[in-house]
Image (spheres, grey):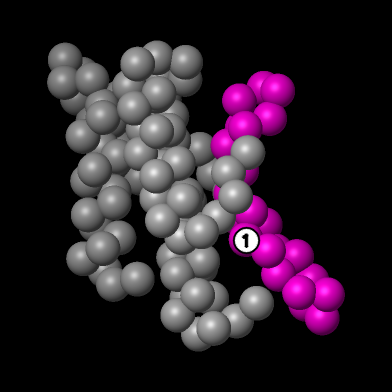
Amino acid sequence: MTLQEIEGLLDTIHNFSREDFPGSHILALTEEDKAARDFLRSEMEKRNLKVYVDVIGNMIGVREGSEELPAVAVGSHLDSVVSGGKFDGPAGVIAGLAVIDYLNDQGLS
């Protein structure tokens, strides 16, 4: 994943923020949160991840691995604190997508 792709994903998620607040404003369980989650689901599915949502709403993208290598987990959150920065949460989510892209690009499983 290139720096431009990372910036594009951050900008897209940031664009789901409420416009009547400075900074990022994606509070959990709001329409903005749902739109951001729908976008994240599509990004996970583009990468052939199996997407699960648990009973408390955590979205989990799973990439099947192999028995030879241990599992790795990467995570964060899409919602933000009130008027948080553009990186509040989404940076960690996008880092996880970047790891998946690297593994896929290298043909690693």
Classify mark 1: helix, strand or loop: loop
Question: On screen, 96 above or below 105?
Answer: above
| Dominant secondary-structure state across the stretch colored magenta | loop
Instruction: Please say if 68 is above or below 99.
Output: below
The quadrant in which residue 38 appears is top left
The reply to whether the magenta stretch includes residue 57 is yes
Q: Along the horizontal axis of the image, is 72 left or right of 92? A: right
Q: Where is residue 10 in the image (x, y as percent from the top left)?
A: 29, 48
* Viewer-nearest residue: 87 or 96: 96
Residue 7 on image: x %, y % = 24, 57
Q: Which residue is drawn at 16% across and 21% down?
A: 19
Q: Position of residue 95 (x, y in %)?
A: 46, 59
> Could you tell me how many numbered marks the image carries?
1
Q: How crowded is mark 1: few (under 14 residues within 10 Å), some or many (20 or more)?
A: some
The reply to whether residue 26 is visible in this rendering is no
Which residue lies at the image location 45% right of the left edge and 70% below the top edge?
101
Magenta residue span: 53-74
Q: What residue type is labelled 1?
A: Arg
Q: Residue at x 21, y 66 (%)?
A: 4
The residue to which callout 1 is attached is 63
Residue drawn at x 62%, y 32% as measured from the top left: 53
Q: Where is residue 1 in the image (x, y as percent from the top left)?
A: 35, 71
Q: Does 45 lie within the magenta span?
A: no
* Quadrant occupied by the C terminus: bottom right
